[in-house]
Amino acid sequence: MSPQFTLQSLILRTAAHFLLPLLLIFSVFLLLRGHNEPGGGFIAGLVAASAVALYMFALDIRSAKRVLRFEPRDLLGWGLLFGVISGVPAVFMGQPFFTSQWLELTLPVLGELKVGTPLLFDIGVYLVVIGGVLLILLSLAEAEE
Amino acid sequence: MRLEVALPVIIPLFFGALTLILWRWRLAQRVTTVVGTGLMLLSALWLLSATWQDGILVMHMGNWQAPFGIVLVSDLLGAIMVVLAGISGFATAVYSLTSMSKRHEAFGYYPLLHLLLAGVNGAFLTGDIFNLYVWFEVMLVASFALLILGGERAQMEGAIKYVTLNLVSSAMFLSAIGLLYGLTGTLNMADIADKLSYAEDPGIITVIAMLFLVSFGIKAGAFPFFFWLPASYHTPQVAVSALFAALLTKVGVYALFRVFTLIFTQDVDYTHEILLWVAAATMLTGVLGAAAQFEFRRILSFHIISQIGYMIMGLALFTPLAIVGGVFYIMHHIIVKANLFLVSGLVYRLKGTYELKELGGMYRSHPMLAILFLIPALSLAGIPPLSGFFAKFILIRAGVEAEAWWIVAVALVVGLLTLYSMIKIWAEVFWKAQPEEYANRPVHGSAGSGVLYLTIGGMAALTVFIGLGAEPIYQIADAAAHQLLNPSLYIDAVLGER
């Protein structure tokens, strides 16, 4: 690894260990909040990707890949697949593609919960953004090595 | 709600995502691609037959009603184009099984192929002008990546020209959409057409029409904006070349047909007169450019340009028969042109070069291939009873009926020059003996070329079928032209009876 790439900062490295889970939780929060308020899959995906990117800058590429667990390309594929699939349930209800379908659940602790296909679509966007950004970032970082 | 309208777009998107997930398994990717493009072709045929029986079909995506939501509309022209995209997509996928090397597949060939097809089908089916722009971009992004697949120097050079000119075109397209939106306050094409029919100032509309003409002209490879095409089409993998030759420029032609029959019909004397000049210049420059070339794929690339001229001629004459001719020409051209590129790929595989000077003796060594070349080549030149004859015949007859003598003369001369080019390829590649110094080049040999023969043979059979069975094809083209010339059918289908 080239010297200008690693930031030999103890503070950053220590902080990254704490920031990574925090940022990831925050990204999920943004994702779920996005339906009615500012947020959503795109911005949440960027936050999650930047969490991994921060980890990569603080440590190195290998640890970033390990912490990601999945290949970015797979995330991209699954995200796209979720996006397409979210349009399909409407067809079985006799409505045009991508008409949103809602399911209202009453759970014991949480109370009333509305789950629908837009959420699935948003998760798809979330995965596509994480996969896309990290695919670019990790390839560039690896090329620099 | 008609399911079939959305399927040709959804299927390639779905299978594209699937091939992305199956990235690590080469065999699974290949199977998925052949199955996916096959299903896409079937869904396209379903769409065409449904549109043929029930008239223009509309799907309001997400149940948001037009003109506010985005609609997918399938009229006969759109459905025909989707079927042609399905045929060329399927043929390319099968052809790639042998022709695409492991290295190229590993760069994401299959996901990109599906993305390109999704973009092309989306552009053919959308009823929203901004959505059309989006599908154009989907298609372009995929085509940029396919063009440089393999990363050779010549490919980069071609891609830079291709990307630059297409970005200029996109920017112009977008500004034209902005102006149109400012004028009408809507992006739905049917709604725009409806609003413009009451517009008082045709001057500004004509200006916007010209912006669209330039933007789509660049995409279609029309004179004087065709430079990117011969600079780039001979560089990528041959399966990619074939798919590009079949579909990309035709999306531009389709867009011209769409906007200049549906939206911009206020000042036909002016706009379509310009189109006619563009058509003549495109035909001539393309065929003359081809005459000066001695590389297999470059000759074919220049011929795409001259053929685009014929299609625009059909649109420009703007009589019922001429539009029929234009639509017929598109059908004939996509099949024939893709096939010629596929033949060139097989020749390259057997001989290791595209240079006419270095080739030769193929008639003696591969008589089957020689015949399979002759069918699309003679069809391109317009020899009866092949498909190209009927396409040219309808157009020229329409020109005579409209008493546009000079364009008829140009079309006939260009037909003759096309024949010259095809005979040049025939004489150089198949007839003459191969020069000694090039005879012992290391090549792939004929291993695995059965699949390639099969694809080429299938496409050649289609050419013969369009020629011999010209009557039903003519009737479909006739009905498509009828819909194009009566925009109220389209508008009523999208916006409902008012």
Image: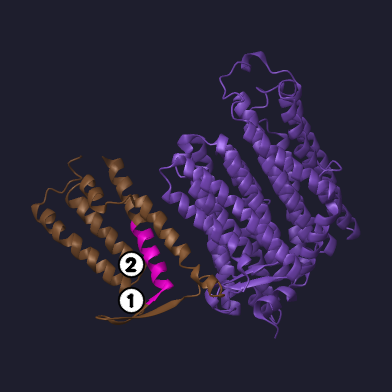
Chain colours: A brown, B purple
Residues marked 2 and 1, same chain: yes
Q: On the picture, is A36 further left or further right than B479? A: left
Residue B46 location, quadrant: bottom right
Is residue A119 part of the magenta span, yes or no? yes
Query: Disc 2 sits on a residue from what chain?
Result: A
Q: Tag 1: residue type?
A: Pro
Q: Vertical placement of B58 versus B28: above or below? A: below
Over which residues does the magenta segment extend? Answer: A115-130
* Front in this rendered view, residue B317 or B461: B461
**Does residue B452 lie above or below B64 as drawn?**
above
Residue at mark 2: A43
B235 in the magenta segment: no
Describe the element under mark 1 as helix, strand or loop: loop
Are circles 2 and 1 on residues that touch, CB within 8 Å? yes
Q: Position of residue B318 (x, y in %)?
A: 80, 63
Q: Which quadrant would residue A106 be assigned to in this image?
A: bottom left
Position above or below: B356 against B263: above
Q: Is residue B144 visible?
A: no
What's the magenta bit mostly, secondary-structure-wise? helix
What residue is drawn where x is 12% and y is 48%? Answer: A8
**Residue on which disc 1 sits:** A38
Picture residue at 76% right of the left edge, 57% below the top = B327
Residue B128's place in the image compared with B161, above or below, is below
Q: Residues within 10 Å of mark 1 (few under 14, many from 20)?
A: few
